[in-house]
Image (spheres, helix red, strand yellow):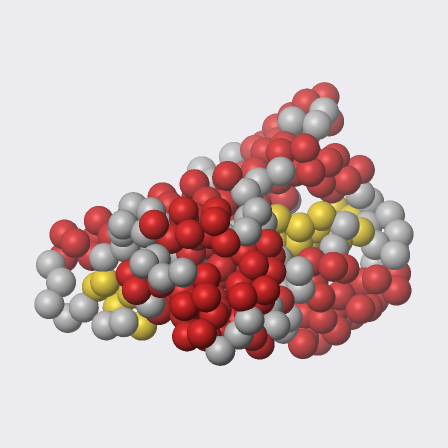
Amino acid sequence: MSNELKVKINSKLASLSAKKKRVAYYLLEHTEQAKKETISEIAEKCQVSVGTISLFAQDLGLSGFKELSVLLSNSNQNFSTVINDHSRMEDIVQQTIQDNINNIQSTYQNLDLQKLNQAAQLIFKSHELVFFGLGGSAGVAYQAFNNFLKTPISVKFNPDFHLQLVMAGKMTSQDCAIIISHSGINQDIQRIVNIIKETQAKIVTITSFDDTPLTQASDYYFLSLTDEFEYNDVPVYSRRITQILLIDLLFTLVMYQDSKVTLPNLKVLRNALKYTNTTEL
């Protein structure tokens, strides 16, 4: 399947109805067969109506089945190699790099630059910036916290879930939360979001799925679109690169909001670290 179509389907999976999910999984798992079939044949295989197929295509942002079939017919493009126990080391390295390149390109193509800049302006004007992320997303949230320490904004992060709940409750309408969540449907993250909404703080989200409770609650959200390579037919996700990319974009735009404010802050930090053994900032 072409990377574009696969990413579109994966980004919508969480919000699809049961019938539409049957269509999605059929197209993902039987691409070569599906691209030769008519809309009626696909509907019969999935045990859904023709109308469901059309609505599924529209959910992906397509005009209808005709545009969907075009993307299906391009399924040989950006072909992803399946990695197994017999793969050469060179193939594994090449495929991993290519998958990350594809993910970055897909994330960029889906990015609304105007909203990205608006989110950066919102962050820059916030009194306090608090980062939230659980499980695998906690590492990305910590990376983001380290980045934004270089800004003039007061920033907070703690990997403990219960402390994140406390920090959420102490936010105000002048603050902004940055939430990193792959699925956007994690119940613990939803508890944090509900608390933040009560404080009227703003929410900027980085996630992989559109139309979830998290994206609906966010003032701005940006999709970290990921296609995965397969090891012995099992998907291996590589979402971290695109999550960090979006963090870097927001950070860079925040630093460019007002150099008279941000640059002196960088100089202060550099002076604070010049007596240490580290050169990192």
Q: Residue lying farthest top?
A: 260
Image side of residue 211 versus residue 99, left or right:
right
- The image quadrant where one finds the N terminus is bottom left
Residue 19 visible in image: yes
Tell me the residue at 60%/57% (across/down).
59
- Residue 272 location in percent, x, y? 60, 37
- Residue 153 location in percent, x, y? 73, 41
- Residue 197 location in percent, x, y? 84, 62
Image side of residue 165 versus residue 77, left or right:
right
Looking at the rendered structure, the number of numbered marks drawn on it comes to 0
Image side of residue 262 versus residue 171, left or right:
left
Q: Quadrant of residue 262?
A: top right
Tell me the residue at 36%/62% (across/down).
37
Q: Quadrant of residue 267?
A: top right
- Residue 156 location in percent, x, y? 70, 55
In depth, the one of 59 and 233 nearer the eye is 59
> Can you say whether 136 is above or below 101 in the image?
below
> Can you say whether 24 is above or below 241 in the image?
below
> Can you say whether 241 is above or below 150 in the image?
below
> Can you say whether 192 is above or below 270 in the image?
below
Tell me the residue at 48%/49% (across/down).
66
Tell me the residue at 71%/66% (across/down).
213
Image side of residue 81 versus residue 235, left or right:
left
Residue 156 visible in image: no
In depth, the one of 100 and 274 nearer the eye is 100
